[in-house]
Structure formats: structure tokens, C-alpha cells
Image: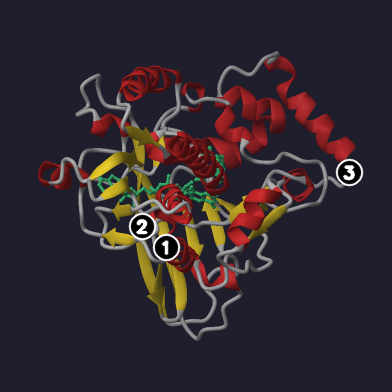
Amino acid sequence: MRYDYLIVGAGLFGAVFAHEAKKKGKRCLVIDKRPHIAGNVYCEDIEGIHVHKYGAHIFHTSNKAIWEYMNQFAEFNNYINSPIAVYKDELYNLPFNMNTFSKMWGIRTPKEAKEIIAQQIEELHITEPKNLEEQALSLAGTDVYEKLIKGYTEKQWGRPCTELPAFIIKRLPFRFTYDNNYFNDIYQGIPKGGYTAIVEKMLEGIEVKTNTDYFTFRKENENIADKVVFTGMIDEYFGYQLGALEYRSVRFETEVLDMDNYQGNAVVNYTDREVPYTRIIEHKHFEFGKQEKTVISREYSSEWKVGMEPYYPVNNEQNNELFEKYRELAEKEINVIFGGRLGNYKYYDMDKVVEAALQTAEKELARKDRK
Ligand code: FAD
Ligand code: UDP
């Protein structure tokens, strides 16, 4: 055995685990099938702009300990995410707040907004929202649902809103104040220097092999470590033996434009069905960039198929049930720890991944010390 841990995936989960294990004197090898570290938070430098190659990433959390943990590796700027929604030729503020309602209905007060929403959903008699559609309607009424939620959600998930879990829309604030902050969390920002630099620091002094797929690597290195920390797809690990879990993939069409400011905001969502992409990201605005050029990415969502990057688990009932069965198999793999968004099949944000990795590391390293 050359290593205590073989860590599969140099994303946030793998990097945090490796960092903590190294601190305790454990020998770690981190591998990733991609040509670079940092997983989905990887940033590529184009025209002096940190381009979020796998989608826009805004760090936000209400957990002070996690915020402080991340601040060891980078200073964060004071970026606050406030996306704009474009519906045909209309423009709205997100998340769903008094600015949105005022523009939609020409009103000024929370009382007026609440009355309109109540009127719109009166006949629907929704008591306990059973799916994303009912949840969205009960929070914001039919106009907001039809213009800002239905089209976007069905493009993003490729399924009718009636077949999606309510929790997906509860990620977003619905508020009756004039506040365009997309998150309710206490701490928010973008790391100065980009996310890749954070992961580089986490992995300082740790051996890393990129362009290395676990399933090929293990054939020749079966006993290379005492334990494996696996942050890839759990169903792939088990050869899809119980059936395939569903994921959504995303394709980014990235363009350098010879202008300094294309859309005036980092995130602009296209909420009608007719526009084929879900959103356009203008990366420089995350860091208040003053470069002469700008880089934009159009985001297209599709169903995941073998060979594509899996981005989002589709956490509906059917997939969650199948995941439970894989989880039972995973429990029997006593020398493998499954973690991260793909290993745990959970729609985790970054802070939750870091928190889960720290908890896993703490438990695992304490256990190993007792041995
Ligand atoms: P990943 O970053 O996916 O890392 C897993 C790594 O494992 C990958 O690098 C992969 O190549 C590697 N791997 C997989 N299989 C193998 C194998 N067989 N062999 C070797 N390597 C393998 N969170 C936020 O908090 N804020 C946001 O604004 C935000 N925006 C997002 C936008 C998009 C489009 C997406 C998809 C996610 C977003 N997230 C956001 C979530 C965030 O990306 C995740 O929470 C986090 O990056 C997950 O880290 P991870 O280590 O679990 O997974
Ligand atoms: N959503 C929407 N309209 C929007 C933005 C988001 O209906 O303009 C819904 C959609 O269902 C999406 C969910 O809210 O999947 C969560 O949005 P979030 O921005 O958190 O998604 P992510 O950044 O993780 O893709």
C-alpha cells in the first residue's frame, strides 16, 4: 500500500477531504479524469477574465464555520448575485420580489402584490403543494409562474413542472421587499483570483494525477491505497447494475466579444420556451472586470447520456428510490467512501459539499486514528 487514500475527483469534495487527511499526516493520491483540478468550479483564464467553465459559481452560505474555512484559501469579493430575467420583450428582476411584482402588475405595495397572488390562485385550492408547479403557483401566482418559472424550469429539467419536486423552486427566495439578492444567506462572494486557485491551495503538497479515469486506473493499481474516496457517479461505480440514475447535462457555448460590456449583468435568464438556452453568463461582472473585451457563455440544458458530463442529479421520487438502493450497496463497500454531488446524488451547493467533506473527513480520520 503506497497511500492511505486514493481520492477520485479533484473537485471540492475530493480536495477538502485530501487537505484534511494530509493535515493528519495521511498519504493521499488524488486522481481526476479531466485534464485539470477543481471539478465543476474550475475557472479558465480567457482575455484576463476568470471564465467559469462548468457554469456560474457564486459562493454563498449561512454557516460561519464554512465561510471561515473557505476564507483560509482566498479572499472573497463583495459580489451579490442579482440575475435579470428576460421573458420575450419584458425584463424582470430576480429572485421573485417586489421589483418583479411591481414591474409585472404596475403596483407598489406588498399588500397589493399579495392580493393579486391570492386572487390568481384562489380557484386552484392548493393546500399542500405536491410538485414544483403547485409550489410555484402558491408562492407567486399564475403570471409569475407562466412568465418566469414554467418555461425556464421545463428547459432546465426537460420535464413538466408537475413531475418535478417542489424543493427545486424553494431554493429561490420569494419575498415581499424590494431586494434583488438571489440568496438569503449571510455570506456571499466570488474568490479573488478564481476558484481554481482555492483548490490548488487545498491540494498543496498532495500528489495529483489528472487525465486519469478511476475505472481504467484501478485495473493496474488495485491495492494502491487502504481506502478510496469516490466522488464520481455512484451508479457508474456499480456498473449501472440496478439501472441508470438520471442526470441533466449542460452545454456551454462560450464566445469572446470585442466589446467591454454585453449585457450589463453577470447572469441573465431567458425564461420563455422559444429561446433554446436557459441563461447567458457574462463572466467579467462576477469580479467587476474592466477588461476591453468580454466573454459570455450561453447555457443549454439536456438529458444526460453516457459520454456527457453529468451536472445535476434529477432528484425526483423514482431516482431517489433507485439511489437508496445504490446507497445500500455502497454501505457494503467498506473500503470506499462515496461523497460529493455525484457520489451522494444530491443537488448540493458548494457550501454543502465542503461541509459534507469536512464531516466525512472528521469521522473517517478519527476512526483511523483509533485503529
Ligand atoms: P465535482 O466538482 O463534479 O467533482 C467531481 C470530480 O470527479 C470531477 O472533476 C470529475 O471529473 C471527477 N470524476 C468523476 N468520475 C471520475 C472517474 N471515474 N475517474 C476520475 N475522476 C472522476 N454551487 C454553489 O454553491 N453556487 C453556485 O452558484 C453554483 N452554481 C452551479 C452551476 C452549475 C451549472 C452547476 C452544475 C453546479 C453549480 N453549483 C453551485 C454546485 C457546485 O458545482 C457543486 O456543489 C460542487 O462543485 C460539487 O463538488 P464535487 O466535488 O461534489 O463535484
Ligand atoms: N428557476 C426559474 N426561473 C428562473 C430561475 C430559476 O423557474 O429564472 C427555477 C428553476 O426550476 C431552477 C430552480 O429555480 O431549476 C433553481 O434555480 P437555481 O438558480 O438555484 O438553479 P442552478 O443555478 O442550480 O441551476
**Element under label 1?**
strand
**Element under label 2?**
strand
- Return the residue found at the far front: 371
- Looking at the image, in which quadrant does ligand 2 appear? top right
Q: CA distance from mark 3 to mark 2?
A: 39 Å
Q: Is residue 183 visible?
A: no
Q: Are marks 1 and 2 in contact (CB under 8 Å)?
A: yes
Residue at the (40%, 52%) spot, across then down: 11
Q: Amino acid at mark 2?
A: Phe
The first of marks 3 and 2 along the sequence is 3
Q: CA distance from mark 1 to mark 2?
A: 6 Å
Residue annotated with mark 3: 109
Tell which tag, 3 or 1, sits nearer the viewer. Answer: 1
Q: What number is the disc on residue 252?
A: 2
Q: Nearer the viewer, residue 296 or 207?
A: 207
Q: Is residue 177 visible?
A: yes
Image quadrant assignment for residue 196: bottom left
Residue at the (58%, 26%) spot, across then down: 166
Residue annotated with mark 1: 297
Q: Amino acid at mark 1?
A: Ser
Q: What number is the disc on residue 199?
A: none
Q: Is residue 156 left or right of residue 219?
A: right
Q: Is residue 147 left or right of residue 225?
A: right
Q: Position of residue 78 (x, y in %)?
A: 69, 66
